[in-house]
Image: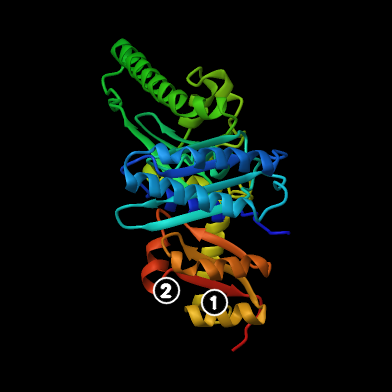
Amino acid sequence: MFRNLSIDKFTLKKIIKELKKWRAPATILLSLYIPPRRPISDVLNLLRQELSITDNIKLKRTRDAVQRALNAAIDRLTSVQNVPKNGLVIFCGEDTMTRGFVCLMFSPPEPVPVFFYRTDKWFHLEFLEPMVEEHNVYGLIIIERDAATLGLLKGGTLRVLDEIEGYIPGKHQRGGQSQRRFDRIIEQMVDEFYKSVGDRANRYFLPLLEEGKLKGILVGGPGYSKDDFVKGDYLDYRLKQKIINRLIDVAYQGEYGLREMVMKAKDILKDQEYVEVQKAIEEFKIHLAKDDGLAIYGEEEIKQALEMGVLKILLVHEDKEEYDALIEKARKTGCKVYIVASNLPEADWIKKTFNGIVGILRYSIY
């Protein structure tokens, strides 16, 4: 019997998010990871052995719940002849408070790394979570003489990590030797400020580099501060090697400044999800303003466009889970689907004005 059990990262994210909510007062939630090439018969034998000893569980409610989970897992596995190329994962159990019973079996988007079986008070998701983490992460630094913002561009989200302020006095007016002494003091203060920014950047970005996730570092800011910071010995040498050569002129600090820097570097970051989502939103806004019939919104209208095969881009707010079926259908038809993270500037506008779903047509149908 052949069954397509494979899921993509988008679906896996939703599963992880939901299963994290499940809790039980006893060890009744079953988690089972089966790596590729593990014989199904071996796993079934293990589960049947586990089932045979459940009669030793004294508390009837716990015993019944564990037996139900094991029987459900056995039932799912007997419908499969061979473990898929990425392995299998099974979660079975009941939330004794409110959620009822669940039993999921699927093949994840990356190979299952270990054989693992356990019943616990929660589902063990730690082997799946690395599969949905974004591996192409960019560190962001906006630097000037007395202020800095550190941020992270990760998939479709941009996050402020730290905002740092220093106190650097203005120009001294006296002139002469007093002026030169004062200038040296100011330069020392600037140097100390840059060191503090570099130290914090090292703490944030080095772990990502060591995990193999840091793809690059963007540095921006007004004037010559960014050049002085990059040329100085303020960042760990390994991070300096990750700095993208083109430094970017940015007028602002904080989240607004980070967004400005990222969009000015969109040619460098052309495959980054955040940039692609922003570009799609801008395209939707342009078509909406032109009233050229290419901007579309409303669930029924988007469904119709999908049926006709004319939907080019679909944008869905991350909170709108009721559109999951539409998203899946759009992906199958070759439509580009973008999930709008809630921290994007236009996310709230899309959510409140258009109920969280908009699109762009290949050509006008009205």
Q: Position of residue 170 (x, y in %)?
A: 29, 28
Quarter assignment of residue 113: top right
Residue at position x 42%, y 41% in the image = 55
Measure the alpha-carbon separation of dots 1 and 2. 12 Å
Residue type (three-letter) at the residue carrying disc 2: Phe
Quadrant location, the N terminus:
bottom right
Q: Nearer the viewer, residue 348 or 226?
A: 348
Nearer to us of marks 1 and 2 is 2
- Crowdedness near tag 2: few (<14), some (14–19) or many (≥20) residues, C-alpha within 10 Å: some
- Where in the figure is residue 236, as x and y percent of width and height? 52, 19
Q: Residue at x 36, y 57 (%)?
A: 99
User: Which residue is depicted at the point 61% across and 48% down?
Assistant: 108
Residue 30: where, in percent of width, then height? 47, 44
Judging by the rendered image, the residue that carries numbered circle 2 is 354
362 or 311: nearer the eye?
A: 311
Side (left or right) of 97 relative to 73: left
Up-down relation of residue 231 to residue 117 (above or below): above
Q: Which quarter of the figure is the C terminus placed in?
A: bottom right
Residue at point 45% right, 64% down?
321
* Residue 137, numbered circle: none
Disc with the residue nearer the chain's start (1 vs 2): 1
Colour setup of the view? rainbow
Which secondary structure lies at badge 1? strand
Q: Is residue 316 above or below residue 178?
A: below
Q: Which residue is tagged 1? A: 295
Q: Secondary structure at mark 2?
A: helix
- Identify the image quadrant of residue 165: top left
Instruction: Verify CB contact (< 8 Å) between mark 1 and mark 2.
Output: no
